[in-house]
Amino acid sequence: MKKVIFNFFITLIIFCLCFTYLTAQPFENERPLEKFRTLKKVKLLEELNLNESESEKFLIKYNSTENLIIEKQDNFKKALDDLESAMKNKKSEKEILELTNKVVDAHNELLKARAKKFEEVKKVLNNEQFAKFLVFEKNFMEQIRDLMKEGPKFRKFKEKNR
């Protein structure tokens, strides 16, 4: 039974590592990330077509929940890093289990923060605006992923045609 539980946690950890790797956007410094976040907010405000008062209320909720998500993402990454280090250092099964529990807890906290973002934003938007917000979140991230995938191909095309 212990072996089944241990295998389950190892599988869960691998899943979490893959999820984190696929969703992470590593940058050398904060400037590109801040530019990205600013661009996202500008595009989002354009899409929602909010007046000044609504924009202010929206940005307060949006920024506070985004900051919470960033904090939870950092906690999740640290928990995974600690687990990875423990595994490399051949720590005991008990220590590994404790660290896997921390990873799962950190992941759950991250999911709660993401859900809270939707709940808080919904409070300041009408139904149509909230629907636009949800669709924008999905489409914007898909467009960014597509651009990142196409980036190397586009650069190769430019270099080839010089």
Image (cartoon, helix red, strand yellow):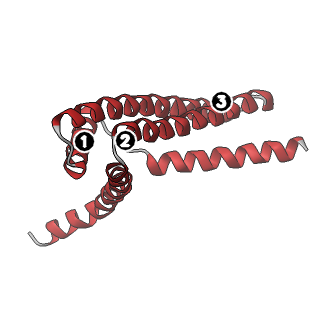
Q: Is residue 133 left or right of residue 1?
A: left
Left or right: where 82 falls relative to 6 = left
| Dot placed on the residue nearer the N-terminal end, 2 or 1 | 2
- Quadrant in which the N terminus appears: top right
Percent of width and height locating residue 97? 75, 32
- Tell me if I can see residue 29 in this picture: no
Question: On residue 26, which mark appears?
Answer: 2
Q: Are marks 2 and 1 in contact (CB under 8 Å)?
A: no
7 relative to 50 in the view: left or right: right
The disc labelled 3 sits on which kind of residue?
Answer: Lys
Residue 116 located left or right of residue 43: right
Disc 2 marks a residue whose amino acid type is: Pro
Position of 6 relative to 63 (above/below): below
Q: Where does label 3 land, which residue? A: 102
| Label 3 element class | helix
Q: Amino acid at mark 1?
A: Lys
For the residue pair 16 and 82, the one nearer the viewer reads as: 16
